[in-house]
Amino acid sequence: MTAASWGLLVATFVACCVEAVEAITIVMAMGLTRGWKSAMAGVGAAIVALAVVTSAAGYALTTWLPESALQLSIGGLLLIFGLQWLRKAILRAAGRKALHDEADIYRAQVATARAAETPATGLDVFSFTVSFKGVFLEGMEVVFIVIAFGSNAHDIPLAVLGATGAILVTLVIAAAARRPLSMVPENLLKYGVGLLLATFGSFWAVEGVGIFRTGHTSLQWPGNDAAILGLLAVWFLLSRVFISALRVPGAPTQQSHHPDSTAREVRA
C-alpha cells in the first residue's frame, strides 16, 4: 500500500471510531435500561435505511459529477465539517468549552430512558426510536466520511474497510467492557478527526477549483499527495496557536472519567 492509501485507511478508521462510540453509547443506554429487543430492532432499521441512502448517494455522486466538481463539492463540505470539529476541539483544549464525556452522556440517556413510560407488551417505541435515531444520525456521518474520502481517493473499498474496522473494534470493546467507552480518549480523537477533515477538505477543494478553468481538469498540488502532510502540519500549527491564545489558566487538558461510577451505573 502507498502512503496515500495508509492515510485514507487511518483517516476513515479514526473518524468512524468517534461516530461509532457515540452511537454505541446511545444503544447501550437503551438496551441495558429497557431491554435489547426493541433497541436492536431500531439498530436494524437504521442499518437498512443507511444502506438505501448510501447506495443512492454513492451512485449519484460518482456518476453525475465530473471529477473536479466532485473534489470541489466534497472537499468544501469536508473543510466545513473539519473547521467545525476543530473549533470545538480548540475551545475544549483551551478550557472554554466542556470536555466531551461519554459517561455523562450515558447517564443522561439512562435517566431519560427510565423516566419514559414502558409498554406492557410489544415494541418499546421509545427504545426503538432513540436507538434508530442515534444509529442513523451517527451512521450518516460515517457514510459521508466513507463516500467523501473514498470517492476523492478513488478507493471506496479501502474507505469502507477503515470504517468497518472502526465499527468492529468499538463493538468488541463495548461488548467486553459492558459499559460506555469513556476510556476512549474521545476529545483527542475529535481533535485529530478535525485536523484530518480540514486537511483533506482543503486539499481536495483546491484541486476541484479546476472545474472553473478550460477543460475542467483538476488542479495539481506541488508534490501531489505529499502536500497532504504539509497541509496537516499547517492546520496543526494554526490550531495550537489558537489554543495558546484562548487558553484559560488551570483548564483541564484531557478528558477525566470515572470507570467505577460508570460501571455502577451500568449495573444499576
Image (cartoon, helix red, strand yellow):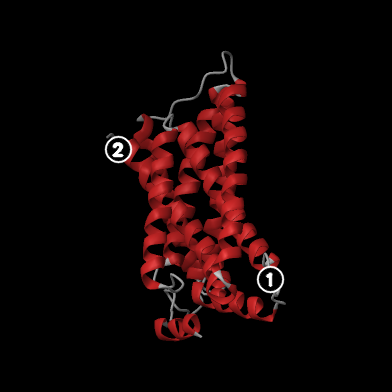
Q: Nearer the viewer, residue 29 or 209?
A: 29
Residue 232 located left or right of residue 35: left
Residue on which the image places disc 1: 121
Crowding at mark 1 (Cα within 10 Å: few <14, some 14-19, many 20+): few
**Residue 3: which numbered mark, if any?**
2
Q: Nearer the viewer, residue 51 or 197?
A: 51
Could you tell me if residue 250 is visible in this image? Answer: no
x%, y% of residue 64?
Answer: 62, 23
Give the amino acid type for the residue marked by disc 2 in the picture.
Answer: Ala
Residue at the extreme front of the image, as rendered: 121
Quadrant containing the N terminus is top left
Q: Nearer the viewer, residue 107 or 221?
A: 107
Seen in the picture, residue 24 relative to 151 is either above or below; the reply is below
Crowding at mark 2 (Cα within 10 Å: few <14, some 14-19, many 20+): few
Q: Nearer the viewer, residue 161 or 148?
A: 161
Separation of residues labelled 1 and 2 (CA atoms):
55 Å
Residue appearing at x 67%, y 67% in the figure: 124
Res 70 → quadrant: top right
x%, y% of residue 263?
Answer: 43, 82
